[in-house]
Image (cartoon, grey):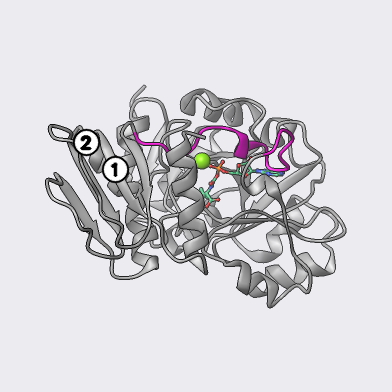
């Protein structure tokens, strides 16, 4: 299959409306989308990514009020979160309505919905006739794609179209909050921080499934994620890094490491920059055949929590 690369949101949306699968930019990471009114196209997403079929997809809408296209009932906490954070890097899980096929939700009676703030994503979604189900546009298990080049590296020839935009401004996937039960529950950390969520909804459950669980509420969390081919080793701030001789090693973090013999290193000025660089750096390391990547753990606050979550998963291959 030939993958058509375009800079035009209209052209990209035409592929979606015709039942194709299209990668597109968002502020978090690139998505690989299909219209929810074309369930056969939704199934092709799973094939292209090699994604386990029991891992549900997030539905993307152009405007906050379009949430009503996929959910009939929005409770007061969800309402508050939507008002404060949509459009933006937050996904809300709600009871789904009958517009959402089982292929999107992997049979769950809930749906994750998100309204991206990236202007390219917005104009693309506006040209799509139905909401767009989209996981991250990477091969399953690999780091999410934060640039159009990363998308092509993984999916060229497997998808109908790539809508080429800017590199992702945030670089980590959206925060996910489950609002389908009595108390909102944080399922995945992201750029909308726990502190910000708590300032909007009084109570917020944070579950152990953020780490591991046999029956995670967010099914995707049980699969390996974000892992480069290289081994990821976590280190504390200013902890000396020792590289065995002859091993190609790299480092990413906020402080300058005490280490010699690194083949590649990236010092990030802020946690936001760390988030934006991380997945791109993992891919760069793989292309340079790096064997070990040392990653400094950022402070456990704000987006630092989300970085630590992705680093933990990359390090454990989980
Ligand atoms: O920032 C993002 O969220 C990106 C962009 C493209 O929007 N998307 C993304 O999708 O990261 P994906 O498929 O890579 O991760 C979605 C996560 C998975 O862990 C999945 O299990 C969870 O969301 N999820 C989706 N629907 C759910 C639902 N109804 N209930 C619980 N978890 C859900
Ligand atoms: Mg993903």
Provide residue 288's location: percent of width, then percent of height.
Answer: 18, 36
- Quarter of the image for residue 293 reads top left
Tell me the tag on residue 290.
2
Prevalent SS, magenta region: loop
Provide residue 297's location: percent of width, then percent of height.
Answer: 41, 57
- Quadrant containing the N terminus is top left
Q: Nearer the viewer, residue 56 or 284?
A: 284
- Quarter of the image for residue 216 reads top right
Give the side of residue 229 with respect to residue 216, left or right. Answer: left
Task: Identify whether 73 is placed above or below 311.
Answer: below
Classify the position of ligand 1 by quadrant: top left, top right, bottom left or bottom right: top right
Q: Nearer the viewer, residue 59 or 287?
A: 287
Bounds of the magenta segment: 213-228
- Quarter of the image for residue 245 reads top left
Give the side of residue 304 with respect to residue 283, left or right. Answer: right
Residue labelled with disc 1: 293
| Residue at left offset 14%, top offset 44% | 263
Report the Cα–Cα distance between label 2 and label 1: 7 Å
Q: Are marks 2 and 1 in contact (CB under 8 Å)?
A: yes
Tell me the tag on residue 231.
none
Provide residue 212's location: percent of width, then percent of height.
Answer: 64, 40
Is residue 216 within the magenta segment? yes
């Amino acid at each position: 299959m030939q993958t058509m690369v375009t800079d035009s949101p209209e052209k990209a949306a035409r592929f979606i409306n015709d039942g194709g699968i299209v990668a597109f930019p968002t502020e978090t990471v690139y998505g690989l989308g299909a219209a929810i009114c074309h369930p056969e196209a939704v199934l092709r997403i799973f094939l292209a990514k090699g994604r386990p079929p029991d891992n549900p997809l997030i539905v993307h809408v152009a405007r906050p009020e379009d949430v009503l296209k996929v959910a009939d009932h929005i409770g007061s906490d969800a309402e508050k979160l939507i008002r404060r954070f949509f459009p933006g890097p937050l996904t809300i899980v709600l009871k789904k309505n009958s517009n959402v096929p089982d292929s999107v939700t992997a049979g769950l009676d809930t749906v994750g919905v998100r309204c991206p703030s990236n202007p390219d994503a917005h104009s693309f979604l506006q040209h799509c006739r139905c909401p767009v189900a989209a996981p991250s546009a990477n091969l399953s298990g690999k780091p999410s794609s934060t640039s159009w080049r990363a998308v092509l590296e993984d999916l060229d020839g497997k998808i109908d179209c790539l809508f080429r935009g800017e590199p992702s401004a945030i670089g980590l996937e959206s925060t996910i909050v489950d609002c389908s039960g009595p108390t909102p529950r944080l399922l995945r950390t992201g750029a909308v921080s726990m502190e910000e969520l708590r300032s909007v909804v009084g109570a917020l459950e944070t579950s152990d499934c953020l780490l591991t669980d046999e029956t995670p509420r967010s099914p995707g969390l049980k699969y390996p994620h974000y892992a480069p081919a290289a081994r990821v080793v976590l280190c504390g701030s200013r902890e000396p890094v020792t590289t065995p001789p002859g091993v190609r090693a790299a480092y990413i973090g906020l402080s300058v490491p005490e280490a010699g013999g690194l083949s590649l290193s990236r010092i990030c000025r802020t946690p936001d920059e760390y988030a934006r660089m991380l997945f791109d750096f993992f891919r760069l390391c793989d292309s340079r055949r790096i064997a070990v990547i040392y990653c400094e753990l950022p402070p456990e606050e704000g987006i630092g929590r989300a970085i630590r979550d992705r680093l933990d998963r990359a390090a454990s291959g989980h």
